[in-house]
Amino acid sequence: MRALSLIIFLTIWAAPLWAEESVGQLILDEGQAKIDRNHLDIVLLKPGKQEKVEVGDELFIGDASRARLVLANGNGELRLYSKSLVRLYNTGKKNLIGLPIGKALVELNDSANLEITTANSRLSTKGAKVLVWMQGKETWVLMLKGSGQVINLVDPEKQVSLQAGQATAVYQNEAPSPPLAFDPETLSEALNLDSNQPALKLRQLWPLPLPPIPPKGPLNKSSKSESDRIDEVEQQLDQAREQINEIQKRD
């Protein structure tokens, strides 16, 4: 009886802590996505399917796929593009999110804070709408609304402040570029491309020595079994992790 009482007490005491672990909901809009939670794999295959996500989860959005991460407590959402890998670190007053590779369009409510870390940079912002894109060895940050600060992870002293309508690029271990204004055409291209397609107009803003990235192939509309689609997204995730390891290698 005493043991049962102890179990009940611990369950009641721990429940609020578990509740605080929730980051929000991952909603699949197109294609497939995978949640890695303590080596437990959850694969989303049907558009409209949603799953609660927690601190410590790793999210991967498959090729030719789209998903939304709707943050808890009405803090906002991240629109996640194909081939994006997202790591959820913390909640509370500030959301801490990793985007080591891929692209996210972030829209926060006015009081929500966010830190989003790519393979080479970190953006800190509040109540903003911002596009963050890690491609190759470069991060692009386009501030659509609000303001924020971008630093280089290797040397945090290298930082810039962005206002609405401005963008910066962080190439490898270089300092973030001075803020530059972007035009509607450049923004439209950035919003509509998949994360692994070449952003030609963005690259015209900064004279960086980036090799061209081959365009994505045509969308494969052929029907595949659920097993095949799960295997496919697993292979894509392994490839993304390998790319991240290459990006984070320091000379």
Image: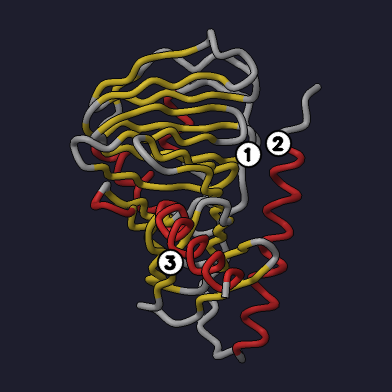
Circles 2, 3 touching at the beta carbon (< 8 Å): no
Q: Contact, CB < 8 Å: mark 2 with mark 1?
A: yes
- In the rendered image, the residue lying farthest to the top is 157
How packed mark 2 is, by other alpha carbons closer than 10 Å (few <14, some 14-19, many 20 or more), is some
Identify the residue at image location x=47%, y=47%. 103
Give the residue at mark 2.
247
- Identity of the amino acid at label 1? Gly
* Residue 237 position by quadrant: bottom right
Numbered label attached to residue 122: none
Marks 3 and 1, how far apart in space? 30 Å
Where does the N terminus fall, quadrant-wise?
bottom right
Q: Which residue is mark 1?
A: 136
Lower sequence index among marks 3 and 1? 3
| Label 2, label 3: how far apart the Cα atoms are | 30 Å
Q: How far across and down, in percent of the image, does residue 136 sit?
A: 63, 39
Residue pointed to by mark 3: 52
Residue drawn at (35%, 32%), measured in percent from left and top? 142
* 144 w.r.t. 161: above or below: below
Residue 232 seen in the figure: yes
Q: Position of residue 213 (x, y in %)?
A: 61, 46
Q: Nearer the viewer, mark 2 or mark 3?
A: 3
**Looking at the image, is 63 positioned above or below residue 212?**
below
Q: In whole angstroms, how far apart are the C-alphas of marks 2 and 1?
A: 7 Å
Q: Nearer the viewer, residue 173 or 73?
A: 73
Q: Amino acid at mark 2?
A: Ile
